[in-house]
Every structure is written in structure tokens, then in C-alpha cells.
Image (tube, rainbow, N blue to C red):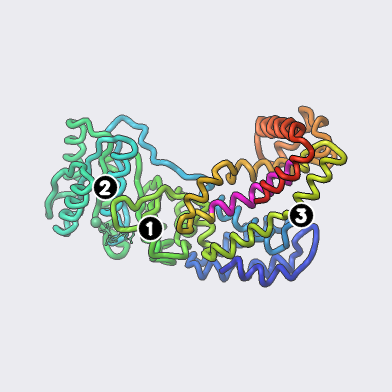
Amino acid sequence: NLTARLSRVLDSLRGQGRLTEDQIDTAARELRMALLEADVALPVVKDFIEHVRQRALGAEITQSLTPGQEFLRIVQQALTETLGSRPEPLNLRQQPPAIILMAGLQGSGKTTTTAKLARLLKEQEKKKVMVVSCDVYRPAAIEQLRIVAGQVGVEVFPSAVGQDPVTIAQNALAEARRQYVDVLIVDTAGRTTVDEAMMKEIAALHAALDPVETLFVVDSMTGQDAAKTARAFADVLPLTGVVLTKIDGDARGGAALSVRQVTGKPIKFIGTGEKTDRLEVFHPDRIAARILGQGDVLGLIEEAVRKVDHEKAARFAEKLKKTKSFDLEDFREQMLQMQKMGSMASLLEKLPGGAQIQAQLQHIDADKQVRRTIAIINSMTIQERRHPDLIKASRKRRIAAGSGVEVQEVNRLLRQFETTREMMKKVASGGMAKLMRSMAG
Ligand code: GDP
Ligand code: MG
């Protein structure tokens, strides 16, 4: 568990300002172990560590974090970014029927995922879906698709052992057109290992069908091998996305990082069980947390709660009451508190009953927006943070460039800050302490 490891190693190290090279080296060693334990492929581990090291070298330690926590924060951010930052939906914007081609090794979960996807598209997007099996080597595979498609109530274009896969697919497409089908999902044959015949066949199917989505289905439990398989498929097929299956059997999640890094393609869905409703949109931050071994959810929540510093909140309220007006530094402090609450909220999800608690925390905006806001404020000078009114056009451009956002984002932040400042003014000074305490949980 990386969190535990790093806490142990680094939290004893005190230091202000920046992470030292020694601290980074120590932390990087632990990170390497944790990633290998999570079954991330070795070359991917190396690249990732180098990336994190570079980032950590420049990073300032956020007040109220220990070096270990700061490093973890950097790792988590880098990991989430590498994994894709946001969920990526299927692209079905095309003259129907939109074709989805399923590719992957035998046993990876193609047929199961075909039925899951069909169900999702039918139920959630009200699409008319047809499926077809081009697995002409195993009668059981064709029968399996017929059964699961029957369970989810979508039409199956018939196929039989010994027919030509490309001909089957073309006939299915013609039939789908006749019936005004919205989405045709093409299930294919896989071998137990990568071989040339399989690659030729799937490439021929791709050429004949020109699918709008070509999904690489991969068993997350194959760990290190997932990277090799992904490379082989990505070499012959223009993949558009990945489905990571059997996540329910894999506590580590390392395959997600390997496959994403190797293919460069978004992971669109994860399979979380055998049943046809066990398909979820992929959320990079959740897998990031899993890879970092944050399975120790209770402990983390405790820590998150501890991190939200009650005393500090009270002092802050006091300061506000007494002296100056609310400035961007105070605003950032609020955002940091919210971020801590936010990561706690995402952890809560994994707990039994956690979804309910999380629903109550809905108003806490845990997402990117908060991180971005903090990044923008970090790019300001202290002068600017204390006197936001100084921030005119040229300063805005500099700040935007410094934090890698558009100027509009800086404007948005300043407006948001202004609104908050107004709100702060309205809250009676006595009410402020209460407000801050309630924010601190
Ligand atoms: P295919 O050979 O690629 O078509 O793979 P299948 O769809 O036949 O799946 C192989 C096995 O994996 C079957 O027993 C499925 O029930 C199982 N399976 C597929 N997806 C998942 C998943 O997300 N979780 C679990 N636990 N099992 C899965
Ligand atoms: Mg199959």
C-alpha cells in the first residue's frame, strides 16, 4: 500500500518549501515498488516514475501537507492525467448503423462485453441494437452470444461455424441497414495468444466494416501481459478505445495504466462482473486510487478528516473577522479544504452505503475545476493574491500562461472569487466560524 509506505517513510521527514532530491528518490523507490506490485508493466513504470520525478522536483509543498502527502498528491495527479483525466464516451455520431468492432484475446470478455454494451445502449440511449458473432471456430461462442443477447433483448444476426467472418459481417451490416438499426456490434474470434492469423482476420474485418469504434477488450487480471497484448493489437488496428474487464477480480488495477500508456487510447468502460449489467464508464481517478493501493479506505477517510484542520479553520475565521477582507489566498485555502473533502467523497463511494453518504456530499465539488482553480491561484504573485483588483489584462495573460489555462478561465475564477467574497461579506462575523467549521466537516 503506497499510501502507508510513503506515510511511513516520509512523514517523519520535516521540511518546508520544496521536496528535496533525497525525499524524491526515497519516494520514487516506494512508488516503483507499489506500481510493480499493482502489476503495471515495467517499461510503463519507468516512464511514469521519470515523469513524476520531474514534476516533484519543481513542486512547492502546499502548506498543511507533509512531504509524503505532497508527493502522493503529485503521483495521484500524474496518474489520473495519464489515465485520461475524464471519462470518454462512445462515439456513435455517424450515419446509422454505427459499427462497433470488438477485438481481443480469447477469454478476454468480448462476447460478454458485446451483450453488456448492447444492453447499455438499448436501455440508456434508447438505441436499436443488433449483434453478430464472427467467431466461426467455436459453435459454443456463437451460441453464447445468442443466449446473452437474448437475455438483454437485442437481435442477433445469425451466423454459423465455417462461414467467412467478413461475409457474415457484411451481411449483418446489410440487414442492419434494412432494419434501421442504430448500432451494430460485431463480436469476433480471439486466440489464446496473439497470432498472425487472428490479426489478419480482425484487420480484414476492420477494413470491410470501417467501424466508428474499434474496442480492444482486455482482461485486467492478465497484468504484465496486458501491455504486450495491447501493443500487438494497437499495431494492426486503429483502436478507438479499450474495455478493461474483470476488474472485480483484480484489486490492483495496474493493467489500466499499462494499456493506456501502450495504446494511447482511452479506456472507455470497465467490466465489473459476469452479469450483463456489470459494465461501467471508466473513471480515471477511481482507478488511480486503486493503483495507489488506497484500498485501506477507512484509514484514508480518517486521514482526510484529520487533514481538514479544524483549528486552522477557526483561526481563519477569526482573522477574517478582525482584519482584512477576504482575498485570493483565503479563497485558495477554501479550495484546498474542498479538495480534501472531495477526495474523501470519492473514497466513500467504495464503501458499503458509501453512495448514500456521497449523495449528501454532492455539493462538494471534488473535480478538476477545484484543482485548476488552485493551480491558477498558485501562478499568481502574493501581491496579486492579496489584492485581486490589481489583476488586469496583461497579468491575466501571464497567470493563464503560467497555469496552462485560457484567459477566460482566469476570468471565471475571478468572478467566482468575487461571488464568494460577496457571500463572505454577508455572513455575519459570528456566523463565519460556524460556516468554516461546517466546511471542515
Ligand atoms: P471472449 O472469449 O473474449 O468472448 O470472452 P467471454 O465474453 O466469453 O468471457 C470469458 C469469461 O470471462 C466468461 O466466463 C465471462 O463470464 C467472464 N467475464 C467477462 N467479463 C467479465 C467481468 O467483467 N468480470 C468477471 N468476473 N468475469 C467476466
Ligand atoms: Mg467470445
Disc 3 CB within 8 Å of nearest ligand 1 atom: no
Foreground residue, 265 or 314?
314
Q: Which residue is mark 2?
A: 204
Residue 345 on the magenta segment: yes
Residue neighbourhood size for the residue with mark 2, other residues' Cα within 10 Å, grouped as few (<14), some (14–19), many (≥20): some
Image coordinates for residue 308, horizontal then vertical, percent:
69, 54
The structure residue drawn at horizontal position 40% and vertical position 57%, both measured from the top left corner, is 230
Foreground residue, 226 or 115?
115
- Residue type pointed to by label 2: Ala
Magenta highlight range: 331-346
Q: Which residue is mark 1?
A: 232
Q: Residue furthest top?
A: 393
Counting residues from the N terminus, which is met first, the one under dot 3 or under dot 2? 2
> In the picture provided, is 303 more to the left or to the right than 193?
right
The structure residue drawn at horizontal position 59% and vertical position 67%, both measured from the top left corner, is 2
Q: Which residue is mark 3?
A: 311
Q: Residue furthest right?
A: 323
